[in-house]
Image (tube, grey):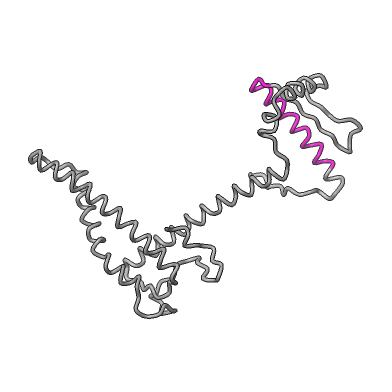
Amino acid sequence: MTRKKVKLAYITNDSARKATFKKRKNGLMKKVSELSTLCGIEACAIICSPYDAHPEVWPSPLGVQRVLSQFQKLPEMEQCKKMVNQESFLRQRITKANEHLKKQRKDNREKEVTHAMFQCLTGKSLQNLNLMDLNDLGWMVDRNLKEINKRSDSLKKVTNSQMAAGPRAEHPSQRAEMQTFEVNSDNMQRQQWFMDLLTPQEPLGFGGPDEMMLPFVDNSQNPPWSNTFFP
């Protein structure tokens, strides 16, 4: 059974806050002790609270003084190198979360456009797609065509080198590659069809049930997907 995620916010209830403090303080002391034992390092902990008359230290006042003395001997730049407060820590977490969100949005958008591209191959209409959708779809089609051309050139070089070396038995993997090449060549012939679809002569609008629309796309002024995802 997974543990429920605790909301990191100030506990307003006095008794609950005191109980949480005692529980987490003991856990923190235990973790510092384990870190020092397992890694053979010098470590200390100092905890001040309104529940105790004097600060609680680990491992001992003498041990704390020894660690602090070593820390104070370091140059000032080294002392501050990895030091963070709550504000800077939260800023780092927010920046990291924003980067992850941006990457996830780009991945989702690419999957949606890929899905739309395959729908085009089945004959779905593009009348429900807006200009941004068509721009992203054109980028996706162009990228796939470049990959097909690259693979085509590679297979041609292999075929030419085999012909120059003389006839020999065809390997099953080579036969499969040639079949794939034929399928890809079929797709390349659809390029003009794609270009015609991406430049419709009539205004875009809503149509019948056979017309296609990208899922999860917000066509408002501030859509979650931006065409800056794709060049």
On screen, 230 above or below 211?
above
Q: Main secondary structure of the magenta part?
A: helix
Whether residue 195 is situated above or below residue 171 in the rendered picture? below
Q: The C terminus is located in which quarter? A: bottom left
Residue 96 horizontal side relative to residue 186, left or right: right
In the rendered image, the residue lying farthest to the left is: 166
Vertically, is 51 above or below 179?
above
Tally of numbered tags: 0
Image-quadrant location for residue 50 = top right
- 124 or 91, which is in the foreground? 91
Q: Quadrant of the N terminus?
A: top right
Would you say residue 11 sits in the magenta stretch? no
Q: Residue at x 47, y 66 (%)?
A: 215
Q: How far across and how far down the image is residue 67, in percent?
A: 75, 22
In percent of the image, x 64 and y 22: which residue is there?
Answer: 39
The x and y percentages for residue 81 are 66, 33
Part of the protein shown in magenta? 18-41
Percent across and percent down for residue 100 are 55, 50
